[in-house]
Amino acid sequence: MMKTTDFIWNAAGQKRIEKLTKYLWIDRQCCFCGEKRIGDKGNRDTVMYAKNDVFGDSFANWGLLKAPYSEWICGACAFCLTREIRLSSFVATESQLIKFKKGEIEYYIFNPPDPPFAMAITYSYKKHLAIRARISMSKENYHIRIEEKECWFAPAKLKPLYDVMLKLYAIPESEKGKAQPRTWFTKAEMLTGNYRLGRIMAYGRDNLYTDEAMLKPYRGQIAFELLVYALNLEL
């Protein structure tokens, strides 16, 4: 199977890194993926960049390098380490790289593209996710890279859970029209299961008891945390 870095780079059209001026078509081993590339001048698939030009002072994932003794890095791995890809959540397909914002997470996790594809979601906009993502071959149960964690996501199974979260995070009628409306419950309350008494009474104890029966089995799971993060305030 194609390496994920190659897959993502191909999705981006084998985009060259403009700021890196030192690149050659030479027979070298990539320090990151460990693959040996045979130089073919003009062929972007075989371009090699100087390792020291790619890794910044803040890079801390040295343990991931398959050939740390090499002074070169291939175009695919170099692209997947750029700031451009680090600052976005994304889904890569065979034909395109789609970068999306926080408010679009809900759409993409419940409507993944046809496989193969690779998906990664950032919370901090600081982590190198592309180099750790995986290629998924099913959209019924697929892999998502999330910061330092990863999970398998089954949209059909998790949609009912998310629908309950949407109810809990909805704005009550009494709050609508206010400059800073409150939701029935906060994201922190959903994550912990510790709800404020006043909000419980307003929402209804029996209603919350029913909804909590859906949330409780999933609480603490990575997919649960992702769904809470994906919630958008509907004004």
Image (cartoon, grey):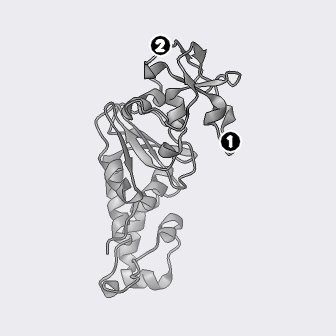
Residue 203 in the image, given as x and y percentages of width and height? 37, 80
* Disc 1: which residue: 60
Asked which quadrant contains residue 167, the reply is bottom left
Question: Is label 1 in a helix, a strand or a loop?
Answer: loop
Q: Amino acid at mark 1?
A: Ala
Q: CA distance from mark 2 to mark 1?
A: 31 Å
Q: Nearer the viewer, residue 230 or 156?
A: 230
Question: Which of the two discs, 2 and 1, sits closer to the camera?
Answer: 2
Q: Nearer the viewer, residue 102 or 31?
A: 31
Residue displayed at 57% across by 47% down: 127
Residue displayed at 46% across by 51% down: 223
Residue 108 in the image, given as x and y percentages of width and height? 33, 49
Q: Nearer the viewer, residue 228 or 24?
A: 24
Going from the N terminus, do you reach mark 2 or mark 1 first?
2
* Disc 2: which residue: 40
Q: Amino acid at mark 2?
A: Asp
